[in-house]
Image (cartoon, helix red, strand yellow):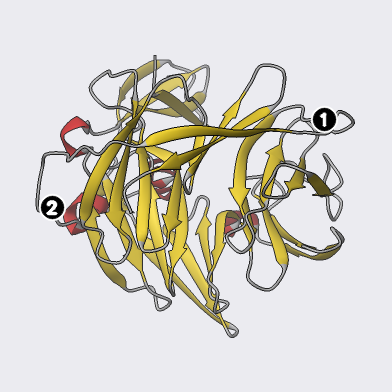
Amino acid sequence: MNGRYIVLICFFVLSCSSGGGEATLGKFLFLEKAEGQQTSERVWENVSVSRMFELPMEEEIMLYDPQWIIPDSTNGDMYVVDYGVYQILRFDSTGNYIMSYGSGTGSAPGEFLSISSVEVAYDSLIYVTDSNNARISSFSKATGSLIDSIVFDMQARPYRHAITDTGIEYFLRAFNKLSFESNYRDRSVEFGELVEGDRYASYLLGIGMIETYQNWMIYVPARFPVIMVYDVNGSLVRAKKTMTLDEFEEPQLVRYVTNGIESYRIEGEDVNSTRVSVVGNELLLQSKSYSGAEDRTVDVYEAGSLEYKYSFRLDHYYPGSITNDRIYRRTRDGTVIVHSIDRPS
């Protein structure tokens, strides 16, 4: 089913019986804190899409399993996360290969067991978050060499990482009741109880993307129709419901016990993509479910106020990730076709 997800968490228990039933999720603090938009109806704008080039351009460079692309806002370079070799490949703004970062699969410094977040920072560093290794590695943007490798406790391991131009770091953490942490000038603040309940439910229901705008952190959960903004002190600056509110159905957590193993299965529909872009003073958010339409919807909000501005549709011919004003469409032969989006200024 399109957009359907099932997540399992298993625990060993003494019982050997089997069965099912609902488990308590607690209160969804997302929705309680979020204000509504001024309008419930989308305002549609026309956009044009133009093909730019295909990655890689050189025959000797291969992409094996490209998953997503991170643009460098300073010069237009592109960083392709290739799960086939567990590396990040860098291309310039016209598609020419520059260099790679990382040493492939493994647990040694510079190696990855997962790549859950990549951040191109202001200080000429590339930060790669590896949640399975509970580590954030930094590489020199200019040379590709490993600079540092910070290991976290498994209970507080980061899933996403973002950094502002002023050096404020934000973390979205896995399996922790307080989902976020800020770090600035050796001062750390933990914050963000998203679900009033078990920490496992908090993580699974709260998973999403973080971005930065000025000195704030913007958080967009995949499974809830809200956008939340926090400051460096962990204070909630504002929260707004998104234009997918009418399509939202609460996720269900179902409990099972089979052969002595207790498991919790979360079922439901994603309402937001796990890709969000801040372009200037605007936030671009792609919806993942919208009344069964084949075309994809992108909603545009003011990044500071979170007020809705307008929406545009992209033909289903353009599957792939939308980052900033570009579409990166993966093909079956391992290449990535890059398109530009011309939208209202």
- Give SS at disc 2: loop
Rendered-image quadrant of the C terminus = bottom left
Q: Is residue 94 above or below residue 168?
A: above
Mark number for residue 62? 1
Horizontal side of 217 relative to 244 (left or right) equals right
Q: Amino acid at mark 2?
A: Gly
Q: Nearer the viewer, residue 197 or 125?
A: 125
Please give the name of the residue rendered at 84% of the width and 58% of the height, measured from the top-left corner: 144
Rendered position, 259 above or below 219:
above
**Residue occupying image coordinates x 24% and y 60%:** 239
Q: Which mark is residue 36?
A: 2
Q: Position of residue 301 (x, y in %)?
A: 28, 53
Nearer-N-terminus badge (1/2): 2
Q: Residues within 10 Å of mark 2 (few under 14, many from 20)?
A: some
Q: Of the residues shown, which amino acid type is indicated by label 1?
A: Met
Quarter of the figure with the N terminus: top left
The image quadrant that residue 17 belongs to is top left
Residue that lies at the very extreme toward the right in this rendered image: 60
Q: Are marks 1 and 2 in contact (CB under 8 Å)?
A: no
Q: Is residue 241 above or below residue 121?
A: above
Residue sitting nearer the eye, 313 or 109: 313
Q: Quadrant of residue 169?
A: bottom right
Give the Cα distance between marks 1 and 2: 46 Å
**Residue at image x 36%, y 68%?**
230
Work out whether residue 263 or residue 55 is closer to the camera in this orientation and state it: 55
Residue 170 x, y percent position in the rendering? 51, 66
